[in-house]
Image (spheres, rainbow, N blue to C red):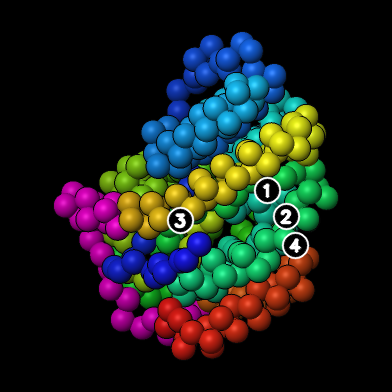
Amino acid sequence: MQRTYRIPRPGIAATLLALLAPLLAATQLAAPADARVAIKMATLAPDGSVWDDLLREMGAEWQEATGGEVALRIYAGGVAGDEPDVIRKMRIGQLHAASLTIAGLSSLDPAFEIFEIPMFFRSYDELFHVLDEMRPTLEKRLEERGYVLLHWMHGGWVHFFSKKPIRTVDDLRRQKLFVWAGNDDLVQLWRKNGFQPVALAATDVMTGLQTGMVEALPSTPLAALSLQWFQQTPYMQDIGLAPLIGGTVITVKTWNQLSPDQQSKLRKIALATEGRLEKEVPRQDEKAVTQMKQRGLSLVEVPDQKEWRDAAEQFTAYKREQMEAVDLLDTARRLRDAYRQSHGGAGE
């Protein structure tokens, strides 16, 4: 598949986090009675969002391809809990699959922390190249931990949304910053560098914004619009921090209940869904920026981008000291730099 995307300007946003939606009755999502394998999948993606819609289309195609023997039951919008809850439920068999953000994947395997590093990638092309090259290694690591990677999820490009404009690194230090609860090392890293991290569950973000507990957060425009976060944080930085990626995984135990033919069909359909997300999410992110600007969002120009890149390099150095999978970080950097050099400094 040819990929030619670049970071949309004036910037794309980012966080596939979602608020706790009203609890759906199990009967509403019941699988067909004749389905031999009913797969229960959870996601924080908002109900009715592009991510949710494409996952449901994937489920319908799974059912058709297997003659109704495999059915996908989706719990969207955080109804199954935050990602730590979802992962716990997969481990005890209450759920069989999940579409996770990078934070969720990192809790399964710390190697995925590579993709949390700010400004490590400058374009979608760089990201896709590294993902393609490292996919076999990452799939194997996940399988060793009991999960099969079905496809990557793409969320857009992350920017800071805030209650007050953020132009300098010190501006960010002055605002209380949302970070994902459960990653104490990351919280300490932010604090060590003079920031004010506030650890919350993804499902508590809106409450945190409304009460003033949180004043800034990293998000994609599409997520900020879908979840109405931008109404509480009407300023968006015009430089991108990182691509928001995630992945859809299924437990090995559930996967092994499927025949090889069924596995092949499901994987093929899942990869096609990945391709649709690669094309559709950047496009919708751009539209989200336009819509939010029409409703009062202000884009904040950053006068000194070098300051932010230097801060990102310092963050990477600190992160490298903490990472378990340092060898994979070095591999990702080597692949990225080689791609960048062969494409004339792509994304610069």
Q: Which mark is residue 139?
A: 2
Exactly how many numbered labels are in the figure? 4
Marks 2/4 in contact by CB < 8 Å: the verdict is yes
The quadrant in which residue 216 appears is bottom left
Q: Which sits earlier in the primary sequence, circle 4 or circle 1? A: 4
For disc 4, the marked residue is 137
- Residue 196 screen position, x and y as percent: 51, 61
Mark 1 = which residue?
149
Look at the picture and state if 117 lies above or below 307: above
Q: Is residue 84 left or right of residue 22?
A: right
Identify the mark at residue 278; answer none if there is no mark.
3
Would you say the residues marked 2 and 3 are in contact, meaning their CB atoms lie under 8 Å apart? Answer: no
Q: CA distance from mark 3 to mark 4?
A: 21 Å
Do the numbered discs 4 and 1 sit on residues whose CB atoms are within 8 Å? no
Residue at the spot 69% in from the left edge and 23% down from the top edge:
37
SS class, disc 3: helix
Instruction: Please indicate whether residue 46 sits to the left or right of residue 284 in the image.
Output: right
User: Left of 282 or right of it: where is 201?
Assistant: right
Type of amino acid under label 3: Glu
**10 Å crowding of disc 2: few (<14), some (14-19), many (20+):** some
